[in-house]
Amino acid sequence: MIGIQDVGIYIPTRIESNYDKVEKFSIDKVFIENKIGFRSISRKDENETSSDLCIKALANLQARVSINLDDVDF
């Protein structure tokens, strides 16, 4: 059967505040809260690639669910 049974996640630990962008973009805190909708964002390290993030998400999945990688088609 084809379907998603579970999902692994990884959220980088480096956090950037959107409030630090107030002066750079000439916006105010109200704009950030009402239009952008989030106060901070997680950013990957400069030396990390997308595949590094995928590997960490897979490790998260394997820590929670017993999975045989040979059974994964794609």
Image: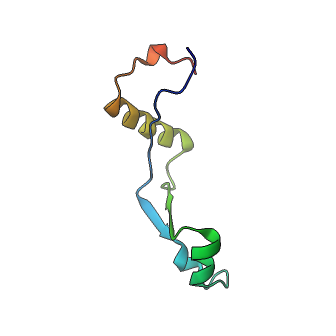
- Depth order, front residue of 48/29: 29
Q: Residue at x 38, y 37 (%)?
A: 60
> In what quadrant of the picture does the N terminus appear?
top right
Q: Residue at x 51, y 56 (%)?
A: 46
* Along the line of sight, the residue nearer the viewer: 6 or 15: 6
Residue 46 as seen in the image, left or right of residue 36: left
Location of residue 64 by image quarter: top left
Q: Give above or below for 39 relative to 14.
A: below
Q: Quadrant of the C terminus?
A: top right
Tell me residue 15's x, y (percent): 45, 64
Q: Report the residue that reaches farthest toward the right.
A: 26
Compared across the picture, whether 49 is left or right of 36 comes to: left
State the image coordinates of residue 59 (x, y, percent, origin top left): 38, 34
> Does residue 34 lie above or below 4 as drawn?
below
How is the rendered protein coloured? rainbow
Total count of labels:
0
Residue displayed at 57% across by 82% down:
29
| Residue 4: percent from left, percent from top | 53, 27
Relative horizontal placement of residue 70, taking residue 37 as reference (left or right): left
Name the residue at 42% across, 40% down.
56
